[in-house]
Image (cartoon, helix red, strand yellow):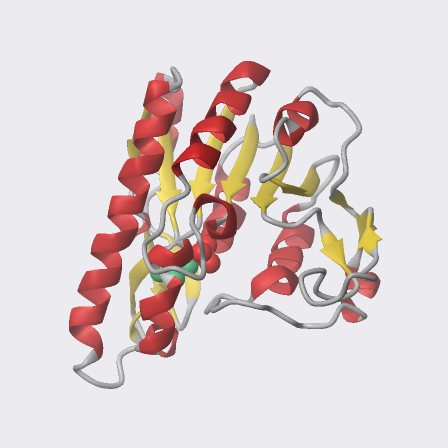
Amino acid sequence: MILIKLGGSVITDKKEYRKFNTETVSRLCKEIKDSGQDVIIVHGAGSFGHVLAKKYNLNGGHVNNEQIPAVAEVCYDVRELNSYIISELNKNGMPAISVPPGSCFIMDDRELIIENDEVIKGFVGLGIMPVLFGDVVLDRKLGFSICSGDQIMEKLGNILDIEKVIFVSDIDGLFDSDPKNNPDAKLYRDVNEKILENVKKETSVDDVTGGVVEKMKSMLRLCNGDRECILINGNVEGRLLSLLKNEDVICTRARGA
Ligand code: IP8
């Protein structure tokens, strides 16, 4: 089974609050279906989550009561985004249901802990794709905190039989600096921890969960044994399909040590 994260930067316009990229998501779902691969999908929050999460510092946990309506609003918004994704998957012949992360995970000082993996495993066993997403989740120490799609990816990598992991983003892979600000940025075709130390931590949009460097760290943790992790640009038509057909495409690959 292949674990795919549809990043918030590709499924939404991260600069515009609650702007869903319908056409891109519809095309990506079709590419996944056409590949014939067995997949499980997680998605990010994009502008349905990060805008308000940043404004009310939700990743800092519960510090004042002005945050409480914002928690409810973000939870509402990311569920709406999730319903759009589920709808596209179902339309493309991939039976999928919503599994909010709080229904099987809890957080403790921002660390994601599996409470119950039965729901996820049970639906996978039935041939129904449980679709989890970046959300605000109850935190034992902080009251609440942000659970990113990348943290969910790592947990699913532990509980399911995953042979390959793909992060679909709006960039061609990992660059030595932000390609949106620097036209001479160099793409790394392969990444390891040493390379990661040299990457500048730049990000051009609001992102409370760390941007590309944190994503790479998640990718490296997800690599174990023969499992390969790949960062790919989902805005380029056909690229995800080519990757899923094992063709050589522009991307960054992380491999286990
Ligand atoms: O977009 C963040 O998830 P991500 C979740 O996967 C929220 O980093 C609510 C901002």
- The tally of labels here is 0
Q: Position of residue 88 (x, y in %)?
A: 36, 28
Q: Position of residue 192 (x, y in %)?
A: 80, 56
Q: Assign the N terminus to one quadrant of the image.
A: top right
As drawn, 198 above or below 60: above
Kindly identify the residue that appears in the image at 67 percent across and 61 percent down: 180
Kindly identify the residue that appears in the image at 32 percent across and 54 percent down: 18
Instruction: In this rendered view, identify the residue nearer to me: 192 or 155.
Output: 192
Q: Position of residue 43 (x, y in %)?
A: 43, 44
Kindly identify the residue that appears in the image at 38 percent across and 59 percent down: 16
- Name the quadrant containing residue 89: top left
As drawn, 73 above or below 101: below
> Is 244 on the left-hand or right-hand side of 87?
right
Kindly identify the residue that appears in the image at 16 percent across and 70 percent down: 69
Residue 118 appears in the figure: no
> Is 185 on the left-hand or right-hand side of 46?
right
> Is 188 on the left-hand or right-hand side of 227?
right
As drawn, 205 above or below 225: below
Ligand 1: quadrant of the figure = bottom left
Q: Residue furthest bottom?
A: 64
Residue 230 appears in the figure: yes
- Name the quadrant containing residue 236: top right
Q: Position of residue 239 (x, y in %)?
A: 66, 30
- Name the quadrant containing residue 83: top left
